[in-house]
Amino acid sequence: MPILRGEGLVRRYGGRAVVAVDEIEVRHGEVVAILGPNGAGKSTLFRMLALLERPDHGRVFLDGRPASPGDTASIRRLGTVFQRPYLFAGSVGWNVGWGLRQRRVQARDRERQVREALDSTGLAAMADEDVATLSGGERQRVALARAVATRPEILLLDEPTASLDITLKREFRQDLDRLVRNSAAAAILITHDPTDAFGLADRIAIMEAGSIVQEGTPEDVIVSPATPFAAALTGAELLLDGVVESDEGGLVTVRVGEALVVVAGTDPHVRVGRRVHVAYRPEDVVLASLSAVGVTSAINRFDVRVRAVVPAGPLVRVRLEGDVSLAALVTRRSAETLALTPGASAVARIKATALRAFVAS
Amino acid sequence: MELFLDSTVEAARLLFGADPYVREVLWLSLRVSGAAVAVGLAIGLPIGIGIGLTRFPGRRFVVALVHTGFALPPVVVGLFVYMMLSRAGPAGSFRMLFTPSAMVLAQALLAAPYIAGITLAAVQAVPADVRLQARGLGATGWRAVLAHVREARLGVVAAIIAGFGAVISEVGAVLLVGGNIRGETRVMTTAIVLETRRGNFAVAIALGILLLAAAFAVNLLLTSVQQGRPGWRTTGPGHTS
């Protein structure tokens, strides 16, 4: 049985539904990430799941029993960390003990729980510091410590790494992973950052325009993204839009400009004559020189010209133009061997199974 | 120049000589104004918090009304309270006129708008998110409101300071409803008026200096509370919000 479940949750602002989620749930020992772009309604869903906002329709269940929004006893089973945590004027330790004081935890137990929370978040040496002097990363840690100090059954985190720089994000993410696994029975992580979601979650719910459009394991989302946004989150790029010309048992041919592109992965709504977006991953594009195009299983072949070569760590990202515009990710050595410089001609090949078509909205 | 020098010497004599008359007048001033601020707090604080925390149609009009209270002439408030408490007035049966209670009532009406108006601004300046986050941390609805007000404490104490400043220095209202009766309703400001009329300028100025010194001492105390560092115990008990 899920420990927390939202069912038919709808929230309207000014007559417009900003959240319309059929179901979302988290089970014991599980971390679920709700991943979506800004403005998708994630924070509104967060507040409803945290019992801090009443939905216009739908209910939230805790251990299978309906939980009323605003019910303090139910809220105290949860631990919430907001995107921009408000730290109350005072010391770090005082803030970490804030939730425990609300629960009237005995002084001795409170002191122990605060110490444990401070230790587990690396804040032990800062217990007496003024929160007004803390950096953004330290403030987030205090907010996290404040939530875990109450030993919640479910931890709800709204964009916990959004305000951190890239180095702090990495550190915070590691701490978060350890804390979530150790301190809470379950966790819901709201984020727009795929690294957070794929790095921390057992299950990912992709949220777009107020609705959950896909839910599954990180592997499911990577292998079979349900929407162009989901595909983009996993590192895919979009080819130009096209129109489906034929469908031979799930192998569809899409006309993209002058080129015909054969696609094996499609969503169930793709039909002949429909406009679609075609997505691929740059690492799936194979480049060859014009003079040495061998026979491969990659069914799609495009004659292209190199537009730009951009270093990307140990690799280079090659931007290509031709009948279709593509990007390919190759090693520096391959780029040198193939003399991939701006203006050079090449052949780009990509397997039909590496492409995915989505009905254009 | 000689007058000011004499006044300072007179003030020192009155203060350090522990003149019983001055001590009595000063003590009554502080008692009346202190009580007036307490009553003003009881009226103004809930109004300020209530308006600061909520949004409703006509709110701007209500806020402007509260701010207009800053401009209330003490003598007009005194006149209003006088009419209410006079024998023919609706509260005449209480026989409060020319008593310290009447002075407290008049001064409370003067302090309340300052307390309400400044509290309102301070509470409004705190992010509304605070209550939501406090609820998320397990606070009950009231505790969340208390947490919000606590975050506005600098402004709330400033409101008390402003309210106290408005009443300790006013003369019009207390003169009208108190009557400046020696040993009964004479306070520092009415004593200054009396001494000035009698031509005892040195005594009047000395009383003025004493009044300012007393006001400074009270404000120093309030400022210490305002600028203190609450929430500094790591885990200890005793914090309610």
Image (tube, coloured by chain):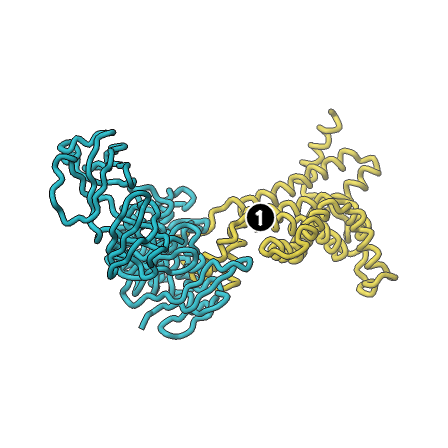
Chain colours: A cyan, B yellow
- In the shown orientation, is residue B107 left or right of residue A63? right
Residue drawn at x 14%, y 49% is: A297
Looking at the image, can residue A119 be seen?
no
Rendered location of residue B160, percent (x, y): 62, 49
Is A296 situated left or right of B157 in this image?
left
Q: Nearer the viewer, residue B89 or A227?
A: A227
In terms of depth relative to the viewer, which is nearer, B126 or B179? B126
In the rendered image, the vertical position of residue A10 relative to residue B234, given as above or below: below
A214 left or right, relative to B239: left
Q: Which image quarter: residue A163?
A: top left
Q: Quadrant of the C terminus of chain A?
A: bottom left
Q: Amino acid at mark 1?
A: Ala
For the N terminus of chain A, which image quadrant? bottom left
Q: Residue at x 53, y 49 (%)?
A: B126
The mark tally for this picture is 1
According to the image, label 1 marks what residue?
A: B122
Disc 1 crowd rating (10 Å Cα; few below 14, some 14-19, many 20+) is: many
Q: Secondary structure at mark 1?
A: helix
In the rendered image, residue A348, in percent from the top left (x then y), is placed at: 21, 41
Residue B15: image location, x then y, percent: 67, 40
> Would residue A152 be visible to someone looking at this image?
yes
Q: Where A218 sits versus A261, above or below?
A: below
Pick the front one: A171 or B229: A171
Q: Residue furthest top?
A: B1
Judge whether A315 appears above or below A351 on screen.
Answer: above
**Which residue occupies the foreground of this view, A273 or B115?**
A273
Extreme-bottom residue of the structure: A65
Specify the quadrant of the image occupied by residue A337: top left
Q: How far across and how far down the image is residue B229, in percent?
A: 47, 47
Q: Read off the chain for label 1.
A: B
In the visual, does B123 lie left or right of A84?
right
